[in-house]
Amino acid sequence: MQTAVPARKAHRPRADALRNRERIVTAAREMFVEYGPDVPLDEIARRAGVGNATLYRNFPDRDALVREVVCSVMGRTAEAAAGALAETGDAFAALEHFVHTAADERISALCPMISSTFDQHHPDLEAAGQRVEQLIGEVMDRARTAGQLRPDVGTGDLLVAVAQLSRPPAGAACFSADRFVHRHLQLFLDGLRAPARTVLPGTAVTMEDLRQS
């Protein structure tokens, strides 16, 4: 008769290990915004308050860390979109709230990172991207159905504008323009309201258009 082998408990990361990982991702996100994606990893570890060994234990190379930061920013942006969908009342006000929140997440910092050499088709990245695209589309569809959003704009139009208006050049006194970001975003948002006063050139920009550009 064989003795039953007790099932092994799933290993869970310790709380301090999770905190260290979160500190690394936060520090990396901040420094990528300030200095670009090529900032030395040692500097990121120093800002996070951890040793180099801790950083490399969590992220064996730069690509792994960049991917985690991109997923983190997209995840937080998706949460903002989900929050906008949960709001009741004025659909365009919910869209405005989402746009301003997305700008605060500095999604513009993703642009130089997703054009780097790491695998852009990694399952984590694709899953995060699909969730963001779906939720933003739903936020826009609700405002459009309410007759508040002009019909000739797409998800790509929205994200391009948010990225451009909240993306001062990395390392070039990048935070000096922060006080203008929300002012200019509101000017852009006013231009999205229906009825439209002008006809836009071209066609609505989709996420697929952005992927092919």
Image (spheres, rainbow, N blue to C red):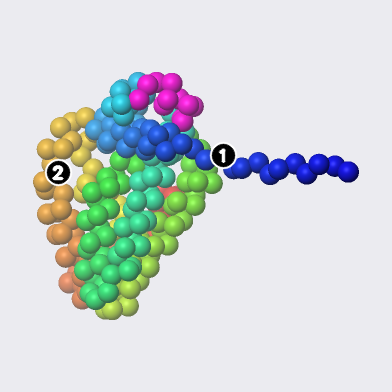
Quadrant of the snapshot with the N terminus: top right
Q: Residues within 10 Å of mark 1 (few under 14, many from 20)?
A: few
Question: Are circles 2 and 1 on residues that touch, CB within 8 Å?
Answer: no
Q: Nearer the viewer, residue 159 or 101?
A: 101
Q: Using the image, determine if residue 79 lies above or below residue 93.
A: above
Residue 123 located within the stretch drawn in magenta = no
Look at the image and give the residue range highlighted in magenta: 50-60
Q: Residue at x 17, y 72 (%)?
A: 197
Q: Nearer the viewer, mark 2 or mark 1?
A: 1
Q: Residue at x 28, y 32 (%)?
A: 31
Say if residue 116 shows up in the picture: no
Q: Main secondary structure of the magenta part?
A: helix
| Residue identified by numbered label 1 | 11
> How far across and how far down the image is residue 49, in percent?
31, 26
Q: Nearer the viewer, residue 115 or 100?
A: 100
The amino acid type found where label 1 is placed reads His
Q: Nearer the viewer, residue 104 or 37?
A: 104
Q: Using the image, determine if residue 126 lies above or below residue 63.
A: below
CA–CA distance in space, label 2 to label 1: 43 Å
Most distant residue in the bottom direction: 146
Q: Residue at x 34, y 51 (%)?
A: 76
The kind of secondary structure element at disc 2 is helix
> How far across and how far down the image is residue 63, in percent?
46, 32
> How far across and how far down the image is residue 30, in percent?
27, 35
Residue 80 position by quadrant: bottom left
Q: Using the image, determine if residue 39 lies above or below residue 113.
A: above
Most distant residue in the right direction: 1
Q: Residues within 10 Å of mark 2 (few under 14, many from 20)?
A: some
The amino acid type found where label 2 is placed reads Asp
User: Which badge, 2 or 1, comes first in the chain's sequence?
Assistant: 1
Residue 178 image label: 2
